[in-house]
Amino acid sequence: MKRFAVFTSFLLLAVSLSVAETPVERYGQLAVEGNKLVSQKTGKPVQLRGMSLFWSMAGEGSGYYSAGTVNWLADDWKANVVRAAMGINETWGQGYLTGGKDANKQRVVTVADAAIAKGIYVIIDWHSHNAHTHTDSAKVFFEEMARKYKDVPNVLYEIYNEPTGTTVASWTNEVKPYAQTVVNAIRAIDDKNVIIIGTPTWCASPEIATAAPVDGVNLVYTVHFYSAYAPHKDPLRAKVKTSLNTHNKAVFVSEFGVCMNTGKTPLDLDEATTWLNFLDENNVSWVNWSVTYKDEGASALKPAVRKYDGNWTPDDLTTSGAYIRGKMIEAYNREESNTATLVTDLALPNPPKTNESATVAPVAAVSNTFSVGPVPASQSGNGVKFFWQGKAVAGGSLLIYDALGNSVKNIVVTDASSGNLSKRAIGAWDLTDAKGRRVTAGSYLVKGKVTTQNGTAVSVSSIVVVGN
């Protein structure tokens, strides 16, 4: 008979957590509460960090609208979001409204579907400087995207890239009416996914928009900065503070560069670091411009690079690309370290074994009403049971992962107890995988959700170590 022990080396658990969970598995549906982007799963602030692709119709960037690029950014750069910048009606290239409707839309869908498959977030960006002049076209496009992705938590909609107006009047008379129309159109179909709204002065005047916000829920306002451009230094951070603290509205840096606002050199990495530290302190999400081989300071790739499926070497990256990749990996490692610390703090001491029976310990459970215990020998079992302390359970599911993050088995949660029992058996694992094969000795992570009959969904987790 196999036996269990508490896993006392929590480094492996931390690895299991980081490998097993994609960003969307970790955070789930996003929402806006006050001035923060938050996870509806945990109730805590979320900071997305990632890359924007280049104009979708541009030869220097369109090839990177691929699953390979998305996967590489997620795996190698540790991006948890990617932005699909669909060119609309610019005079160069065939944009969505200038002869390339189907091709550009397909590029966006390719990126969105790849991000969904990878478990990261994706921004569908109507990349225009004068979107309010073609409101009807934007409305039709976002209605189509909302119908396609309304039940997909990975998707965010960015409805206006960079309004060029600089005044309160331009916001009041042009951008806000446009935004309200498109927001209403999306919300008639998709009432959840976050909508990102462009702000005046090429998104460098968020305080104008947040002083007179658009009506609706789960709305954030854009900030774009280029760190070498003087007006985008302390003066712009002061505007962001006004939006966050005075107006209590959430902002999102959906585009920034470490160069001039033209995309050209010089670079200012010190100022970029000041910005990123500021964004970290305020839990503001950011996306860097951009994945392209165009010969300019904002480009992530050198001019000779044509690797459209990722696999970029350090030599393929520009100064900007190498800097941003490093910052994303640094932030990812910091988050994983914080997760590991949390798990260690919640760990239970190693209890004694009794007659070779199963002994398990819940670790890092979001709810202390969830527990795991051995199947008693009297029931001719040598697996584990899952228990819920409290009100009746309506359902849910638990996923079993091995130490490498591979999915082993899905356990359906059902309330098997009757009467008014306070401790309810809600499922069991017989130590087999999805194909019915006995699992090998080692550590296994249990993660999932339990939904009570009043509709409350609680995330739970535990570690189980299978002995020889």
Image (cartoon, helix red, strand yellow):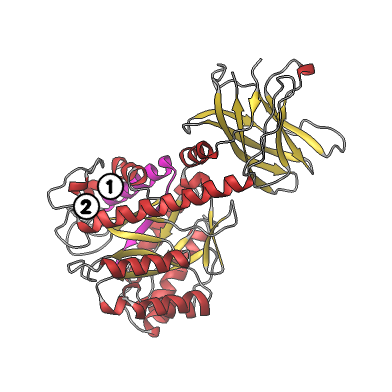
Q: Is residue 142 left or right of residue 350?
A: left
Residue at 14%, 58% in the rendered image: 295
Asked if residue 96 shows in the view, the reply is no
Q: Which mark is residue 61?
A: 2
Q: Is residue 266 left or right of residue 328?
A: left
Helix, strand or loop at disc 1?
A: loop
Rendered image: mark on residue 24: none
Q: Does 195 appear above or below 163?
A: above
Front residue of 165/251: it is 251
Q: Which mark is residue 65?
A: 1
The magenta segment is 101-130
Closer-to-camera residue (279/139): 279
The C terminus appears in which quarter of the rendering? top right
Residue at 35% in and 61% down: 137
Residue 323 image-quadrant placement: bottom left
| Residues marked 1 and 2 touching at CB (< 8 Å) | yes
Q: Secondary structure at mark 2?
A: loop
Q: Residue at x 28, y 51 (%)?
A: 104
What's the residue type where badge 1 is placed?
Tyr
* Dot 1 crowding, Cα within 10 Å, few <14, some 14–19, many 20+: many
